């Protein structure tokens, strides 16, 4: 299987994935406490988000296709920040939602 066939099969451009992984690694330099598992997760998430959302972001923001690598890099960085925000605030939002739903049923 050649590279073009692999990209078509996955539905992504590998250059965007590599840019996202690079962005995730750059984002890891700002982390104070990092474990190996956390680093691997961040790198995987950064590459995945960049690979699957760079094209959509370029269409949404009307960006030229030749800056796909830069877009993937930025999405890799933002994906890590998004994961950090979700890990911090999602449990609180879900808990607050459950509490308010419980009160409305009584």
Image (cartoon, helix red, strand yellow):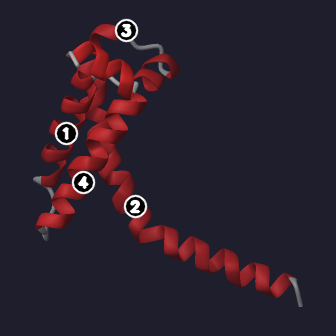
Q: Earlier in the sequence, mark 3 or mark 2?
A: 3
Secondary structure, mark 1, is helix
Label 2 neighbourhood size at 10 Å, few (<14), some (14-19), many (20+)?
A: few
Which quarter shows the N terminus?
top left
List the residue tagged with mark 1.
Answer: 21
Q: Earlier in the sequence, mark 3 or mark 4?
A: 4
Q: Earlier in the sequence, mark 3 or mark 1?
A: 1
Q: Quadrant of residue 86?
A: bottom left
Q: Position of residue 90 (x, y in %)?
A: 50, 68
Secondary structure, mark 4, is helix
The tag on residue 40 is: none
Residue 70 visible in the picture: no
Looking at the image, which residue is at 19% across and 31% down? 18
List the residue tagged with mark 2.
Answer: 85
List the residue tagged with mark 4.
Answer: 42
33 or 6, which lies in front? 6
Callout in the foreground (2, 4): 4
List the residue tagged with mark 3.
Answer: 64
Give the Cα distance between marks 4 and 1: 9 Å
12 or 73, which lies in front? 12
Looking at the image, which residue is at 36% across and 28% down? 10
Q: Earlier in the sequence, mark 1 or mark 2?
A: 1
Secondary structure, mark 3, is loop
Q: Position of residue 22 (x, y in %)?
A: 15, 37
Looking at the image, which residue is at 25% across and 48% down? 44
- Left or right: 64 with respect to 97? left
Give the Cα distance between marks 3 and 2: 29 Å
Label 1 neighbourhood size at 10 Å, few (<14), some (14-19), many (20+)?
A: many
């Amino acid at each position: 299987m050649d590279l073009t066939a692999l990209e078509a099969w996955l539905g992504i451009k590998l250059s965007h994935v590599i840019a996202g992984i690079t962005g995730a690694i750059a984002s890891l330099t700002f982390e104070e406490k990092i474990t190996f598992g956390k680093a691997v997760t961040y790198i995987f998430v950064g590459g995945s988000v960049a690979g699957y959302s760079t094209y959509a972001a370029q269409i949404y923001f009307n960006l030229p296709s030749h800056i796909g690598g830069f877009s993937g890099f930025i999405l890799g960085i933002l994906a890590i920040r998004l994961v950090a925000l979700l890990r911090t605030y999602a449990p609180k939002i879900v808990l607050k939602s459950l509490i308010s739903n419980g009160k409305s049923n009584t």
